[in-house]
Image (tube, helix red, strand yellow):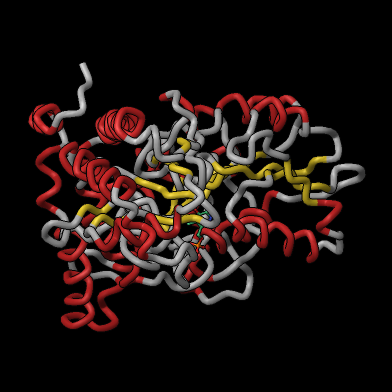
Amino acid sequence: MFDSTEKFAKQMDEKDPMKGFKKEFYIKENQIYLDGNSLGLMSKNAEKTLQEVMDSWKDYGIDGWTQGKHPWFYLSENLGEKVAPLVGAKSEEVVVTGSTTTNLHQLVTTFYKPEGKRTKILADELNFPSDIYALQSQLQLHGYDHEEHLVRVKSRDGRTLDEDDLIQAMNDEIALIVLPTVLYRSGQLLNIEKLTKAAHERNIPIGFDGCHSVGAIPHDFHNQGVDFAYWCHYKYVNSGPGGVAGLFVHEKHFGKTPGLSGWFGSDKSKQFDMEHTFSPAYEAGAYQIGTPHVFSVAPLIGSLQLFEQAGIETIREKSLQATQYLMDLLNELLSDHGFTIGNPVEDERRGGHVSLEHPEAASICKALKAHDIIPDFRSPNVIRLAPVAFYVTYQDIHQTVMTLKKIMDEELYKNYKNERDVIA
Ligand SMILES: *Cc1c(COP(=O)(O)O)cnc(C)c1O
């Protein structure tokens, strides 16, 4: 049973099946890093494989494409195969390529086929701005006014989306649906299965942005029949700043020609024929465009070894326990200080972070940082706290809440301006 003593936190750490992993990551001594949902930390494995790939450039020059420890020519597909278990996909349904936003562009150019009355794209008013900008520009490219053609389903409480509202909006004017798996601010996990089923009953293709779930939550994209998905690897998958992203295309769509073509989307045996007729790969590899950013892929090789060792189910279990523990402590120790827990509290509806709201959120975050605790601020009033399963312990969580209590009790946050920095 939960209690708020440090002793309880210690006991939880002793029982934690993930306890061996923290030492595999670089964390400043005495620092507690709760921002792995924005940028995951470097692991020793990730550092090692980045070094190995640099060495293969040093040792092989051009022949590094086919020789060395991690031949570059096949890296994107080989890693797609390794990411596939994280998203519940078949090996050939995933490729590591591009960035979240460029992959969204690629997938929309392929799956958005306005016809007759069906011309609109369905999204939501809480999604990450980059996704919305991409959808707006795609509509403009088709000559549509995005104010009218991008339908953004409203949130009832400003934090979460109601699946029934989303389904209600899936009418016969909708040509494509793009939604997040987990909302970046409130951490709500949407019911992907229910939404996909509803979309398909209405003959609408549906795709998901998995930035805030891949690496934290197991998915089942293949069995659920999701048409496509895209996500980054630099958040929960710890692949480093600018780490190359991933995309999923369901095998029922294999053989389509991607909306945006480039030679790295070729059938690999034909790529160097140098024909002017594009022969796309049959599988998800077809959605690549140009030469892979090899050094920005390399850390992912090592990072994924840790996911293989831990298993995504165990990662999710720890993450759920850790976020629950954090919420229990906040409720017990900080209930008098004007905080609101903005994420859904049910296990099946919350992601990997706790979304703590407070009018003084920006200054509280600065005070936490001054105490070597790294949170994440989202304007105007959200403190995101991600107890990442690999490297945040229960004692870290306990210390975070005790420090937060001190910051509030002693009003230490008043020493800082309540406004965001350039990066927040
Ligand atoms: C992090 C994030 C992005 C970032 O896109 P990039 O192309 O990697 O810069 C986009 N969408 C969502 C939902 C995100 O969480």
Query: In terms of depth relative to the viewer, which is nearer, 94 or 394?
Result: 394
Q: Is residue 63 left or right of residue 154?
A: left
Quadrant (top left, top right, bottom left, bottom right) of the N terminus:
top left
**Residue 48, x across and y down, in percent:** 15, 64
Q: In this view, does 268 lie to the left or right of 167?
A: left
Q: Residue at x 39, y 34 (%)?
A: 336
Tell me which residue sits at (16%, 36%) in the image. Answer: 18
Q: Which image quadrant for residue 399?
A: top left
Task: Quadrant for the C terminus, please.
Answer: bottom left
Instruction: Say which quarter of the image contains residue 14.
Output: top left
Q: Position of residue 404 (x, y in %)?
A: 29, 46
Q: Name the foreground residue: 351 vs 231.
A: 351
Measured from the top left, where is residue 11 in percent x and y?
9, 27
Residue 54 in sight in this render: yes
Please give left or right for residue 30 compared with residue 143 in the image: left
Q: Which of 203 and 156 is in front in this view?
A: 156
- Name of the residue lying farthest toward the front: 410
Residue ID at (28%, 65%): 298
- Is residue 286 visible in this depiction of the protein? no
Q: Is residue 279 above or below residue 325?
A: below
Q: Position of residue 219 (x, y in %)?
A: 43, 34
In the image, is 1 to the left or to the right of 244?
A: left
